Amino acid sequence: MHKQVHGMKKFTYALSMVLLGMGSTPIAKADAGSQAAALLEILKVARGSTAQSIKNAEDNDAGGPAGNDTNTVWSPPENVEWIQHNFNTSDKLCNDAEGICAGWLETASEECKANYQFGDSAQATQTRLQYEQCVYQMVFKPYISLTIDRVTSQLTDTQKREASRLKALGWNQPTTQPVEFRVASDIPEPIVQASKSGMLAAIDLLGNYGPLRVYLVGNDVTLAEALVEDFCAFNYLAEQQQYCRDDQGEGIREMAYIYPGGNGFQQSSWMLESPVQSFVHNPYADENNKHSIDEGELNNDRKVNAHEYFHVYQGAHNVYRGAEDDSFGWSTTRWVEEGAAVYFEQHIMTEMGWQTEQQLKTRVTEDLETIKQFTTRFPGVSMRDVDTSAQTHRLLSYCGELCIGNLQYEFGHIAFQYLETKTAVDKILFEYWSEYTELGWHDAFEKVFDQKVDSFYDEFEAFLLLSVDEQCDILDCG
Ligand SMILES: [Zn+2]
């Protein structure tokens, strides 16, 4: 069954550390247009220098780790301790004859250096997850992207069959059945109300898709157990109950006893005879596993619910299911999936008065700054590197989950903010998803935003080269 699980910890950090905010004031279209022309100029320069950088590295790098002064464009910081791991065993991920692509910054902690490991072994994978934050103490050499043809794959018979079945069942149409809430009784009432209000506001704005059941998990594992039973019965066949209890059921139990909460996952159970959707949310709790009813936390609960409902909405518009793993266009690229959900969450928070315009602008500025740091640390990595699962796996072996997380959330969010200045909110929230059903994510993009995806990547990468101040002039986040 398709499930979409948000890394619990990551999600928590994103929610609790990032201030709410984003600017929805539309920028004058003329400004956006002239900026675009300027961007294309920058773009030509940028692409020229990337090619140059690789060429120089090839010419000059006789084998040892790069870092010589002859590389005119990219040079590493001082005193990098290069990590003796060959990244280039099956593919060339960076331009180094021995595949030495990453190193510790001078300031890296001994703990990270001692524990973080690259490689495919179970041990390496395990500790890498545990110490994932350590990538922020490294620097990487410019990533060599995998070039792919972005051509939407022919629909298979399975996809066509699933689509006609789901459409006949009304999967992609609003339903009259109201959303149902299953709430653990240990959650304070203000939190329950805030969570429901986020969900209901999102349904009001986007339409009521489902049938949808929302589970609010508290901090009492015994009470959570009843939600596990309900969730599994609702989403899985009789013979899959045990599997569910051990898998997502365990996730729900963990939500109850692992604080600080503020996380959730969405599930589209489209394979059932009567397909349904679910969302499981564990509201924020502090380090003593106590729920907070601070207004800021209530707003986080509203935001998470609105965000996850956007995934329900995306799931409802996805009918050509069961595509082959190597097909293109039918499995939504990660930056679109998450970026649009963050864009929506920020939009509705402002519309509903749950955050101010200034908070929204602050959020946009923070994401722009995160992207700047990202680009210093992971040069050459961009949104275009996660469009297929092959690309995603390749990038994962380079810079790990956190790196992909930034592409999904911060890059994705800013990409939609940028698109808003060139197009319109309604195109992003409605028109795109209605075209997406029949065209897939890629072709719908080209139709609704009237631009080739490849050309958007070029333009957006040029935009990302501007200073944050210049970017804020375009996105109105100053
Ligand atoms: Zn999400």
Image (spheres, rainbow, N blue to C red):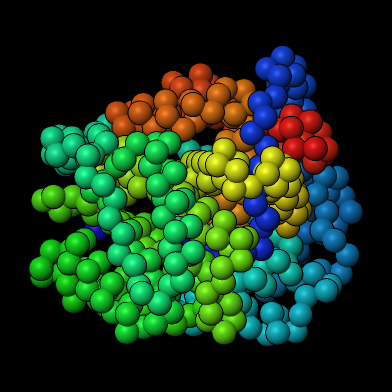
Q: Residue at x 57, y 22 (%)?
A: 423
Q: Residue at x 19, y 62 (%)?
A: 234
Q: How many numbered tags mark residues here? A: 0
Residue 422, horizontal then vertical, whole percent: 62, 23
Judge from the rendering whether residue 442 lies leftward or rightward of residue 69; answer left or right: left
Q: Residue 63: in sight, yes or no?
A: no
Q: Quadrant of residue 35?
A: top right
Furthest residue toward top: 30
Q: Residue at x 56, y 71 (%)?
A: 292
Quadrant in the picture for the C terminus: top right
* In the foreground, 417 or 120: 417
From this view, report whether residue 428 is shown above or below residue 398. above
Q: Quadrant of residue 41?
A: top right
Judge from the rendering whether residue 381 lies leftward or rightward of residue 104; answer left or right: left
Furthest residue toward front: 189
Quadrant in the picture for the N terminus: bottom left
Residue 243, horizontal then vertical, whole percent: 21, 73
Q: Residue at x 73, y 50 (%)?
A: 366
* In the foreground, 47 or 267: 267
Residue 124, horizontal then vertical, whole percent: 52, 78
From this view, report whether residue 236 is shown above or below residue 375. below
Residue 417, horizontal then vertical, whole percent: 62, 35
* In the foreground, 329 or 173: 173
From this view, report whether residue 354 is shown above or below residue 188. above
* In the foreground, 137 or 122: 137
Q: Residue 353: in sight, yes or no?
A: yes
